Amino acid sequence: MDERVERILGKLAEVRAHKPRTLGAERHFFRLAAPLTETRVRKLEQTWGPLPEAYRVFVVQAGASGAGPYYGLLPPKRWAEAGDGSLAIVDQGDDFYAVLGKDGRVRYVAPDGSPPLLPENEDFLAWYERWLDELSWGYEHTWFGRPMPGSVPQLVAALAGPRRGDALWALVQAPALPEEARALLTTCIADPDPNVSGGAFALVRKHKLAQHYQPELRRALQSADPEVRRWAVGALEPPDPALLRPLLADPSYPVVLLAIHGLRGDLTDDEIVALLASTDAGIRRSGIEAARKRSSPTTFDALVAHVSADPGDPALFAMLLAVERGVVDEPRRALAYRLSVDHVAAARGPREPSAGAYGLRLFAPDEPRAFELLLELSRHPEPFYRYNAASNLGVLGDPRALPALRAMLDDAAIPRTPAVARTWSVGEEARRAIARIEGTAPTS
C-alpha cells in the first residue's frame, strides 16, 4: 500500500473513533466504500482520461467514496454532476462542488461560474489528509479548505509574516487562541489592511476578548473605512451600549444593522424615528422592524410616511401593533383604521392584503364596516383574499361569520404564486375557522 494512503487510513480510523461534529458526517459516518478494482478504474478512464495519480491510488487502495470533506466523496456515478467535463469529487451543497483538475489539484467551483478557488494543497491526498488533521485539531469546518492551511503553532508563527491576515482568518477555525497570538492582536487590529484587522476582530469576537482591547476597538469604530467599523462592531461581544448607540447614525447600513442587533432591540423612540428618517432603504427597514418591537405614539407618527401599497406592508403592521397594544389615542386609532380600509381597497393581484385584513380584524369588534369588509373579502375572486378572510374571521371568533365560512367549505382553491403557496385550500381554512369559532379546534 502507498505510504501516504496507509497514513491517511490510520488517521481516518482515529477520527472515526472520536466522532467529531462536522458538516456531512451524518451521511458518511467517517467510513469509506469499498475500493475500485483496477479493471473498473481503467474502464472509467476510457471516459474520463487518466485519473490524477494521487486520486487514482486513493480510490484503488482506500475507498471509492464516502468519508470526506463536506458531504463526503462522490461515487463514480456522480462524477459528472459539476458539468463541463469536470470530475466532481465532493458535493458541497447548493450546487457547489469540489472538482479534480487534470493537474491533480482540487478546485472549488460555484454555480454562478465565478473563478474556482484552489485550496493550498498540491494534490488530492494532501487535501484529504489536511481535512483529517484539522478535524483532529478540533477545527470548525464551515468551509474546509478555503482558509490558509496549518496547525495552530504554524499559523501563530505566520502572524509575524506577510500572510498574517490569512493566518488570522485560519485561526478563527481553531478551538482556542494561544497567549502568544493574543499578544499580537493589538498590532493586527491597528493594521491598515482590512484583511488583517478583520481577521483580528473576528478572533476577538469569537473568544469574547473585547474587554482586553477597548482602546483599539474605540479607535477602529472611528475609522474612515466602513469595513473596519463593521468588523469592530462585530467584535463587541458582549455588546457595549455606550459604544453601539452612536453607531446608529453611521452612514453604512451594515454597521447600523450590527449596532441594532447588538443593542438587542433596546432602542429609544428618538432612535427609531432617526432610523426611519434615513436616506438608506435598508436602515429604514431596520427602523420599521424596531418600531414593531417598541410601540408608542411617537413611533406610530413616524411610521405614517412609510405606509405603502405592499400587501404585507411592514409599516402598517407596526402601526397596527401599536393599536393592538393600546398605546395610541383615538385619533391615531381612527387613522390606522382608515389606512387598513384603504389598503384592502387598493390591493390587486393574487396576494392577500394581509396587513389591511389584519387591521380589519383588529377593528371589527368596534367598527361594523370592518366586519362587513372581511365578509366581502370572503367572496373575493382571488383565492388569496378568500383564504385570508377565512383566517381572520376565525381569529376574530364572531359567530356572525359562520354562514359566510360555511359557504366557503367547498372552495378547493389553494392560493399560490411562484413565490408563495398555502398548505391547504380555502375551504380547509374555512373549516379550521369554523372549528375555532365553535370551540372544536384542537388545542395543539
Image (cartoon, helix red, strand yellow):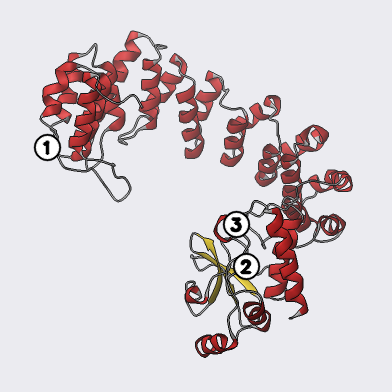
Q: Nearer the viewer, mark 2 or mark 3?
A: 3
Residue 328 coordinates in the image, percent (x, y): 39, 12
The front one of 361 and 329 is 361
Q: Amino acid at mark 3?
A: Ala
Q: Which comes sooner in the sequence, label 1 or label 2?
A: 2
Q: Which comes sooner in the sequence, label 2 or label 3?
A: 3
Residue 439 coordinates in the image, percent (x, y): 25, 19
Dot 2, how many residues are within 10 Å of its Cα: few (below 14), some (14-19), or many (20+)? some
Q: What residue did someone put label 2 on?
A: 117
Question: Which secondary structure, mark 1?
Answer: loop
Q: Is residue 111 above or below residue 438?
A: below
- Left or right relative to 350: residue 80: right
CA gap, disc 3 and disc 1: 48 Å
Q: Is residue 440 above or below residue 140?
A: above
Q: Looking at the figure, which quarter contains the N terminus?
A: bottom right
Tell me which residue sits at (53%, 26%) in the image.
274
Q: Amino acid at mark 1?
A: Asp
Dot 3, how many residues are within 10 Å of its Cα: few (below 14), some (14-19), or many (20+)? many
Q: What residue did someone put label 3 on?
A: 25
